[in-house]
Image (cartoon, rainbow, N blue to C red):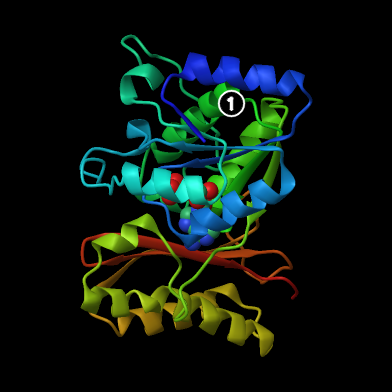
Amino acid sequence: MKLIPDPEKISVVIEKIRQLKKRIGFVPTMGALHSGHFSLINRARKENDIVVVSIFVNPTQFSKGEDFKEYPRRFKKDIGFCRRLGVDFVFLPDRNNMYPEGYSTFINVDNLSDCLCGVSRPGHFRGVATVVAKLLNIVHPDTLYLGQKDAQQAIIISRMVKDLNFPVKVKVLPTVRQGDGLALSSRNAYLNKQERSVALVLSKALRLAETLISNGQRNCGRIISRMKQLIERNKQAKIDYIAIVDPEQLKELKKIAPGCLIALAVKIGKVRLIDNTVIGCA
Ligand code: AMP
């Protein structure tokens, strides 16, 4: 496994590999790797000749007052995980070689970026789309692996790939959870023991919605209000949003439709967590 911090260097190395007609799978991350990331890496390992993982805490996707400085950085440990998972290249750029002095170009995926998480995190998806576009241009993979955990991010990146004709296939893999339902997230590290148990309300609210739907409820407003009631029983949990949307436009729905996305963001103390589920049939 090779560690490469320089974008130009990794581009050159990968271009040589591409010429040998090897399939390249790419998993972009911000590090603090956990089983959610491992599932993406394992899938990339199975489906490609070469696996590239990037580890970069991207400053442009954090707004002022967010946790950019505190975001967990465990690069040594992450590199060990990558080695054990059979990754071929870890791309570890620093801020200056991704955004050198004078950097001025950003990508905005209109409409999809201003709703759901975009409301309380203005500019977040502009930062995400920009860094992923840059990473795709640097790594030039055949397949990009993303997690359903960040559903809006996956939808926005898929849209960008389509709109800007990036020659890459996007695969979105299921959310990996702990045994009790909590979706794995690097931000779970911020939770103390008691907050960790309160954080279960996110997945419980989603399971409640699924149960209501399988019992025949189709009214989105009613489902959301039952989810709210459940979450608001915990004083430490503050709802940012709960939404039921179509999975392409992210427009709010009145009635449950096949494939709709139920997404929520809840603050547990100071920690903002997100989760979602896709409703298969209706
Ligand atoms: P991050 O390091 O948080 O930027 O995440 C890197 C990639 O891992 C993104 O595509 C995420 O959606 C994905 N990911 C994060 N958590 C999970 C999870 N619990 N299950 C599956 N994928 C995940």
Q: Residue 240: horizontal and vertical position, in percent?
A: 35, 62
Position of the C terminus by quadrant: bottom right
Q: How many marks?
A: 1
On screen, 126 above or below 152? above
SS under mark 1: helix
Q: Residue at x 53, y 74 (%)?
A: 221
The crowd level at tag 1 (other Cα within 10 Å; few <14, some 14-19, many 20+) is many
Name of the residue lying farthest toward the bottom:
215
Task: Give the image quarter of residue 262.
Answer: bottom right
Which residue is more in the foreground, 258 or 97?
97
On screen, 216 above or below 38? below
Residue 259 visible, this angle? yes
Q: Residue at x 27, y 47 (%)?
A: 71
Which residue is more in the foreground, 116 or 48?
48
Q: Residue at x 36, y 62 (%)?
A: 273
On screen, 121 above or below 278? above
Direction from residue 182 to residue 155 in the image, left or right? right
Direction from residue 85 to residue 55 in the image, left or right? left
Q: Residue 83: horizontal and vertical position, in percent?
A: 49, 45
The amino acid marked with disc number 1 is: Val
Direction from residue 28 to residue 269 in the image, left or right? left
Q: Residue 160: horizontal and vertical position, in percent?
A: 62, 33
Task: Give the image quarter of residue 173.
Answer: bottom right
Q: Residue 39: horizontal and vertical position, in percent?
A: 57, 58
Q: Residue at x 52, y 32 (%)?
A: 132
Q: Residue under circle 1?
A: 139
